[in-house]
Amino acid sequence: MQVYTLFEGTYSVDATKKFVPFDSTIHSFKDRPASLFINVQPFLVELQNDLVLFDTGLGFSDEQGELILHKNIRNAGFDPTDVTKVLMSHLHFDHSGGMIHNQGNKLELSFPDAEYIINRGEWEMAFSTKSSSYHTDIFDFVQRNAQIEFVEGDGQLNEAISYEFTGAHTPNHQVFLLTEGNQKVFFGGDVLPEPEELVKNFIAKYDFDGRKAMELRKEFGKRAAEENWECLFYHGKSAATGFVDEIEGGFKIR
């Protein structure tokens, strides 16, 4: 099992929830007042029988018009059509924007040969909520054109891929664990988006249920330490991936 980090970039986000590219070498923090600065990095994982993508980023393109996510997948040695499963933790725009893209002024699925794995409750809520974090034009297109498997609760897609319902960040958020031989890879989506959230153990205001998310992080941290999971941090700044050690009073990442 091989993990590839598909770094899409660093962005500032203000109250309007608009994601603006940020490069500290040319941009100034003071010009982005009241902004949250985040990294966005989906992950590609090569399994024996699947090539899986964890979440799809913002779906931004480079100056040549190529989807950044596609370019990163090619740089990893694959073609976007090689992806067999797109595993969605939830459907906020910074995780789902890359499900589709514009190609020559025509909308296309970013991964036409893949199966999109989505929590059914998250999908239904995306169409019913008034939150600007969900872009239903994306989901309308996906619904008409993609292979979708809706899942609920906890379960197994196959011997290597399991999913677990968490809620907490959104009411219907889910996480994934890949197992192949002695390797275990955990994708916690936005329940465990950064190593700092596990190490510092705090309640985040941007979670639907911040206290539950904090408790889940501690639970996953313990399991990660006990079972030697490699954890993938979608918004991680200090580290994109890492292993967890439980220490007195908390956790550390190595």
Image (cartoon, helix red, strand yellow):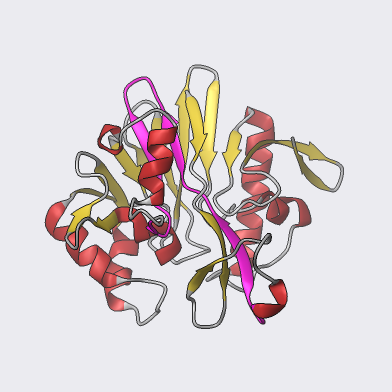
**Most foreground residue, 137 or 87:** 137
How many numbered marks does the figure carry?
Answer: 0
Left or right of residue 59: residue 22: right
Q: Is 89 colored magenta in this rendering?
A: no
Residue sitting at 40 percent across and 47 percent down?
69
Query: Which residues, given as a range, are shown in magenta?
Result: 32-61
Considering only vertical position in the picture, is 184 above or below 218? above
Q: Residue furthest right?
A: 248
Q: Residue furthest left?
A: 144
Q: Position of residue 206 (x, y in %)?
A: 58, 72
Q: Position of residue 61 (x, y in %)?
A: 38, 56
Residue 55 in sight from this viewpoint: no
Quadrant of image for the C terminus: top right
Residue 216 in sight from this viewpoint: yes
Q: Position of residue 70 (x, y in %)?
A: 35, 44
Q: Position of residue 103 (x, y in %)?
A: 22, 55
Q: Quadrant of residue 46?
A: top left
Q: Is 49 colored magenta in this rendering?
A: yes
Residue sitting at 65 percent across and 59 percent down?
214
Residue sitting at 57 percent across and 79 percent down?
14
Residue sitting at 74 percent across and 58 percent down?
201
**Most foreground residue, 175 or 153:** 175
Q: Residue furthest top?
A: 181
Left or right of residue 218: residue 4: left
